[in-house]
Image (spheres, rainbow, N blue to C red):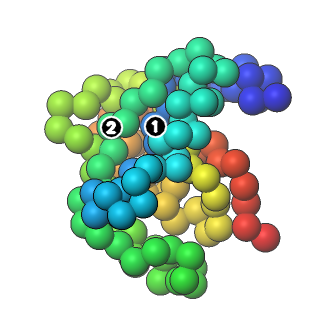
Amino acid sequence: MLAEVASDLRPIDALVPVPLHSSRLRHRGFNQSHLLTIHAAKILNVQVAPVLVRTRRTEAQVRLGAAQRLRNIQGAIQVLPGSLVLGKNLIVVDDVVTTGSTLAACAATLVRAGADTVHALTVAREM
């Protein structure tokens, strides 16, 4: 099913996992979005491009309302220096979407860095 949906998009250059802050990654031991990205990339036969970094520790979004989520994530995501996103068609991968604040912040950051298109892929949606 994933491959069928992706075939309706422009050719995909890479999948981009939503980044965790380094302290949260150390605490958790893994980035669930990165693991999902690896598996989706195999299905779609595209590369994984971990080009985003979380530049500051943010509060866990799960405990916040929509307006708080926007403020919390604002300015916390950047493209790693030297990353080649200019003109690329990218898909940002996350585990769950609630308000879309994190995905929107990632997409906006990639577009500002020159990505041509940015789509989102999640496993679940909070209702």
> What amino acid type is highlighted by mark number 1?
Val
> Which disc number belongs to residue 16?
1
* Image x and y of residue 94, in percent: 56, 50
Residue pointed to by mark 2:
51
Q: Nearer the viewer, residue 60 or 110?
A: 60
Which one is earlier in the sequence, the residue at label 1 or at label 2? 1
Locate residue 6 relative to residue 37 in the image: left or right.
right
Q: Nearer the viewer, residue 90 or 62?
A: 62
In the visual, does 7 lie left or right of 86?
Answer: right
What SS does tag 2 mark?
loop
Residue 83 visible here? yes
Question: In this rendering, would 9 be left or right of 27?
Answer: right
Quarter of the image that includes the C terminus: bottom right
Q: Check if mark 1's residue and mark 2's residue have beta carbons within 8 Å.
A: yes
**Residue at 24% over, 59% down:** 55
Using a 10 Å C-alpha cutoff, classify the residue at mark 2 as few (fewer than 14 neighbours), some (14 to 19) or many (20 or more). some
* Type of amino acid under label 2: Val
Q: Quadrant of residue 110?
A: top left
Tell me what residue is drawn at x 50 percent, y 57 percent: 104
